[in-house]
Image (cartoon, helix red, strand yellow):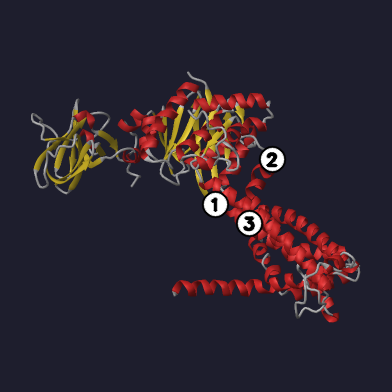
Amino acid sequence: MKKIMENLYLVLVFLFLFLPIAVLILFSFNTSKLNIVFQGFTFHWYFDLFQNRTLLEALFHTLIVAGVSTVISVIVGTISAYGLHKYSFKGKNLINGLLYIPVVIPEIVLGIALLSVYTLLELELGLFTLILAHICFCIPFVIISVRSVLEGMDPHIEEVASDLGASKFQIFTKIVIPMLMPGILSGAQLALTLSLDDVVISYFTAGPGANTLPLQVYSMIKTGITPDVNALITIMLGIVFIILTISTVVQLRRFKKESSV
Amino acid sequence: MKKVILKIEGLKKSFGSKEVIKDFDLNIYEGEFLTLLGSSGCGKTTILRMIAGLDSVTEGHIYIDEKEVTTLDPKYREVNTIFQNYALFPLMTVEENIGFGLKMKKVDKKVIKQRVQEMLELVHLQGYEKRMPKELSGGEQQRVSIARALINKPKVLLLDEPLSALDQKLRKSMQLELKQLQKKLGITFIYVTHSQDEALTMSDRIVLLKDGKIEQVDTPIKIYEHPNSLYTAQFLGESNLFTGTVSVVDEKYTLVNVDDQVLKILSQKWKVDDSLDIILRPENIKIDVKNKQENVLEGKIVESIYDGASTKLMIRVQKRLISAMYLGNDKLYSKGQVVSVSWDIEDAIVLKRDVYEK
């Protein structure tokens, strides 16, 4: 009896978590235009999707913004984290504290703030301002995630490297970066996901020509969401799933290799 | 006279307002095994780090092979350091770890491979090339870190408590191995440790540090048998201390009043009314020896402590607790037994008590 209850509990939790996604996938194959009843199976919406220019353009923008802002925030964030960890200077604690502000601040505040700055600087809203905004909220996440790895690192390792004749640059690229990889990757993952599905900040900083996918879907609510959005989301889910599977398998293999000794 | 490979002049180091090293001068000779010994916080590691260039020098000069290196970057100093926690590069194989120094010097890959092989042979780790540091035991990791340092043919090898993370048995065998390695290669070793056993068994010379200053520099035998201060005597080995005042001095012997007893010591430069510390090592204390006339005290066994190959005794002599030891583990004395305690007159270490020192 206890066993049954335990299993039931598990099933319910998983249903709660994954039912909405399952419904979405299901309706991407629905012949009816309405997301209410399932009438029959079709690939129609997938063909439709590739005709829908606005949606594809929005997807393209999203990928550009997410890609660029992830790369830049990972580079800037990693170097900052290293600097903040390694060197002591006046106001270091203050900076460390300030880092958390973009993390905890309501998105709408950051969105409005960025918009005011752009207006002040007379920057024309577009992809550029959007990327800038995304970099701004991604950097702290990268710094925090990289720093957690740095804190567990043996400081003697860098000293040994310099003792053995490595320059500061060589130490950073050949020793530190590879050791920080887990932190850098998880920071990148965070930045990528945050950027991919951001609505609020993008809403303020995107401008007319730079519609992203979340913004597009959001604006479609008013006119009714077409099933080709479901198809698009399903494809994206599929890609995410494949990436996740690969990274899990790689990690599992590494874990097995390490623990087999 | 041997060649001076490392010369340290008037070295000082402060962290903020705290002076950690105060005026440290030392010449270290080629091929020497020198140990920096001291309790934790005495500055021994700081000195090592300044030699390596990992900590800056506040004042003073360091010369390696007659070349001043005081402000030189670590990568240009012909010394290498071995750390207590090995600090192997975790993502590199044993081979890559050992070859790192040569790779930084842009040595030809074939040469590196060959030199790595030689090093692996030297530290008895043939066949370990492709292993990762995580797959090695503590002792093996330490061997890799030794090989990684020695491949650069340093003029001086600095070792910062390299064996303290190993278990007792491994530590003993590594001590021997390090000593043999040093003799074989003829490289100068500067070895930092807080363990007096390690210092006594391995070193050619010991530098005993106290609060950032040299207390005594000598060979292990001299520093143990002829300490020049009470601190040195008590830091190295166990000691029984008698404090007294000289009452009679003649050509051969001096008599010292200790509490209400009179002890006899060899005359040296002592004068009447001098305050003296008389130090006796437990292994020199003799129990129930017949035909002894001088320095025979009566005591009662308080404790007999089994210590494997030897036995330790705690004996109460009046107010004083004296520790003695004998080889073997037969229980010769029982608690409460009354015994006589004595020693050979030349075994007593006698120091003049400095009036300014507490």
Pick the front one: B75 or B252:
B75
Among the 4 quarters of the image, the one containing residue A128? bottom right
Pair 3/1: label in front: 3
Residue A245 picture quarter: bottom right
Residue B104 or residue B340, whichever sits in front: B104
From this view, report whether residue A114 is shown above or below residue B316. Answer: below
A211 with respect to B2 (left or right): right
**In the drawing, does residue B336 fall left or right of residue B48?**
left
The residue lying at 83 percent from left, 75 percent from top is: A226
Q: CA distance from mark 3 to mark 1?
A: 30 Å
Q: Which mark is residue A170?
A: 2
Residue A56 found in image quarter: bottom right
- Determine whether, in the image, residue A85 is placed left or right of residue A63: left
Q: Which mark is residue A147?
A: 3
Give the residue pinned by disc 1. Answer: B17
Of the two numbered discs 3 and 2 on the same chain, state the one appearing first in sequence. Answer: 3
Q: Report the Cα–Cα distance between label 3 and label 2.
A: 20 Å
